[in-house]
Image: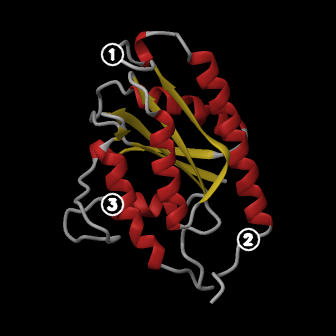
């Protein structure tokens, strides 16, 4: 089984990513269940705006899309900025939108029978709102959202230290991340054993 994590931090490599640090907890938990995991930091790639799978020369989204289609599990990890997902998270949803009309040989949308989850960090509140936006968008595209398929860390209202600057709240976020990984794998295995068919007409 394979998984891909899209790290939607605004920081390109090699800058440290708080979102990547929490996502790594989920990565290690998935690996503990025997899943082969790859992480893609979107800020390291040229991803033009649009709602197509391939926007031509220089567009690096097709390689990201191919990694998603090789995987049974997708994790979208995003920081919170002014109460919303990052612009890279929104860009990922916009580019994934093309999958709604793309089908496999059996007539199923290509996102069917793939499971998705969400990781959110931020030194401000709004995590549940961000989770709802991301999970809702992924469900629209055709991904299955597992029970409690998310974890987050934040500092509540007002400014404060970032995830990597304090240990406060980590125990809960990490335990929730491990539960998230377990649920993602369980649902992915269930879908592999009994796949969804094409939408009824």
Left or right, 157 with reference to 59: right
Category of crowding for the residue at label 3, using alpha-carbon neighbours closer than 10 angstroms: few (below 14), some (14–19), many (at least 20): many
Residue 119: horizontal and vertical position, in percent? 51, 37
Q: CA distance from mark 3 to mark 1?
A: 34 Å
Give whichever of discs 3 and 1 has the lower sequence position: 3
Tag 3, which secondary structure? Answer: helix
Say above or below: 118 vs 81: below
| Proximity of marks 1 and 2: CB atoms separated by less than 8 Å | no
At x 66% / y 39%, what residue is drawn? 180
Residue 20: horizontal and vertical position, in percent? 44, 31
* Outermost bottom residue: 201
Give whichever of discs 1 and 2 has the lower sequence position: 1
Tag 2, which secondary structure? Answer: loop
Looking at the rendered image, the quarter that the N terminus falls into is: bottom right
| Proximity of marks 3 and 1: CB atoms separated by less than 8 Å | no
Residue 127: horizontal and vertical position, in percent? 47, 34
At x 29% / y 29%, what residue is drawn? 14
Left or right, 132 with reference to 17: right
Residue topped by disc 2: 195
At x 57% / y 58%, what residue is drawn? 71
* Outermost front residue: 157
Say above or below: 90 vs 20: below
Residue topped by disc 1: 159
Left or right, 59 with reference to 175: left
Front position in the image: 176 or 31:
176
At x 41% / y 39%, what residue is drawn? 78
Left or right, 136 with reference to 90: right
Q: Nearer the viewer, mark 3 or mark 1?
A: 1
Q: CA distance from mark 2 to mark 3?
A: 27 Å
Q: Which mark is residue 61?
A: 3
Looking at the rendering, which quadrant does residue 91 occupy?
bottom left
Tag 1, which secondary structure? Answer: loop
């Amino acid at each position: 089984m394979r998984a891909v994590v899209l790290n939607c931090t605004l920081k390109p490599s090699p800058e440290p990513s708080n979102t990547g640090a929490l996502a790594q907890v989920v990565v290690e938990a998935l690996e503990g269940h025997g899943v082969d995991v790859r992480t893609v930091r979107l800020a390291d790639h040229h991803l033009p705006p649009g709602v197509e799978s391939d926007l031509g020369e220089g567009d690096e989204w097709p390689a990201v899309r191919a990694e998603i289609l090789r995987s049974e599990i997708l994790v979208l990890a995003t920081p919170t900025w002014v109460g919303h997902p990052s612009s890279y998270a929104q860009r990922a949803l916009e580019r994934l939108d093309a999958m709604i009309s793309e089908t496999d040989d059996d007539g199923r949308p290509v996102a069917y029978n793939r499971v998705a989850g969400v990781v959110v960090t931020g030194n401000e509140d709004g995590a549940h709102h961000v989770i709802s936006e991301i999970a809702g968008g992924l469900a629209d595209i055709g991904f299955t959202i597992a029970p409690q398929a998310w974890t987050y860390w934040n500092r509540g209202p007002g400014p404060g230290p970032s995830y990597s600057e304090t240990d406060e709240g980590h125990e809960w976020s990490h335990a929730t991340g491990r539960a998230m990984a377990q649920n993602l794998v369980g649902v992915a295995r269930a879908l592999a054993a009994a796949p969804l068919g094409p939408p009824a007409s």
